[in-house]
């Protein structure tokens, strides 16, 4: 039982490049979330999904897209990376929107 | 919009000292409350949670938190810290009002350094 896994763990991009972060969970959770963590700002919600095939915008969605084609996977895409997107990205999942969320190990992204 | 405030950004204390971290939220409705911990280089883990019932909640590793509804607060405490408690601590609040979007809102975090 791996819980929530994220790939890659680290990535360096140049401005304008694109990439996709993968999140996978094996707990059969309906709800999945993408956050970014920046110093002093806690975690801010980028996008979330309430089930397979559905996605919704969070607090800071600009510059990101997501897809949830399979229940266990939630992909976060950066179409044209900017230095402001340098951050640590965490994926999380939960069985309901009110219960605790289980977090992945994070992806540290640097955009030069 | 909902908000969560953690008043201390950094706390430095010695082993065996007592720890209290403040958390206040801006909601008026029913909420679920959480404290998460992030040890250096690791992902967030749940320390404790409050849904209903006894407002004094006990979590893992000797931590506890008290929900005071009238003060919109959910402060975290530990009577005697250890070096291994060095971590960043996050308070999080989830409103049970559907109009608020059912989303978890995090505070800015408090970095705690315990000196041996």
Image (tube, rainbow, N blue to C red):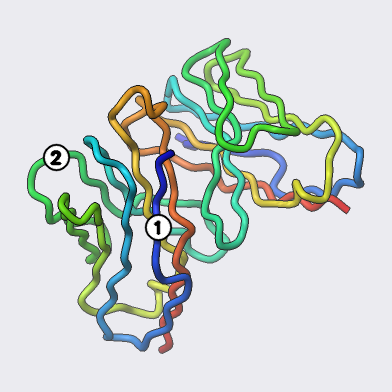
Asked which secondary structure carries label 1, the reply is: strand
In the rendered image, residue A12, in percent from the top left (x then y), is placed at 84, 50
Which residue in the structure is indicated by mark 2? B52
Left or right placement of residue A84 versus residue B16 in this view: right
Quadrant of the drawing holding the C terminus of chain B: bottom left
Mark 2 element type: loop
Asked whether, in this view, residue A83 is left or right of residue B40, the answer is right
Residue A52, horizontal then vertical, whole percent = 53, 12
Q: Residues within 10 Å of mark 1 (few under 14, many from 20)?
A: some
Give the CA separation, mark 1 to mark 2.
21 Å
Looking at the image, which residue is at 58% across and 26% down?
A: A57
**Who is closer to the viewer here, B72 or A15?**
B72
> Residue A94, image x and y in percent?
40, 30
Decide if residue A95 is in sight here: no
The residue positioned farthest toward the left in the image shown: B54
The label on residue B5 is 1
Q: Residue at x 21, y 59 (%)?
A: B65
Residue A46 in sight: yes
Asked whether, in this view, residue B39 is left or right of residue A67, the answer is: left
Identity of the residue drawn at 39% across and 67% down: B7
């Amino acid at each position: 039982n791996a819980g929530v896994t994220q790939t890659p763990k680290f990535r360096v991009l140049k401005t304008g490049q694109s990439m996709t972060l993968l999140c996978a969970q094996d707990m059969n959770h309906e709800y999945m979330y993408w956050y970014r963590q920046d110093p002093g700002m806690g975690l801010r919600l980028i996008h979330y999904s309430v089930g397979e095939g559905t996605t919704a915008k969070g607090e800071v969605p600009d510059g990101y897209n997501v897809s949830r084609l399979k229940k266990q996977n939630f992909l976060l895409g950066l179409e044209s990376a900017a230095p402001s997107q340098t951050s640590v990205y965490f994926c999380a999942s939960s069985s309901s929107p009110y219960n605790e969320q289980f977090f992945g190990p994070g992806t540290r992204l640097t955009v030069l | 919009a909902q908000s969560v405030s953690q008043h201390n950004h950094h706390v430095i204390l010695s082993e065996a000292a007592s720890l209290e971290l403040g958390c206040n939220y801006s909601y008026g409705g029913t909420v679920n409350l959480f404290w998460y911990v992030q040890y250096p280089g690791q992902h967030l883990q749940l320390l404790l949670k409050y849904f209903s019932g006894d407002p004094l909640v006990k979590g893992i590793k000797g931590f506890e938190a008290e929900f005071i509804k009238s003060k919109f607060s959910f402060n975290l405490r530990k009577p005697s810290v250890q070096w291994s408690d060095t971590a960043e601590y996050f308070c999080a609040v989830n409103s049970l009002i559907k109009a608020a979007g059912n989303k978890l809102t995090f505070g800015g975090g408090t970095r705690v350094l315990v000196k041996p």
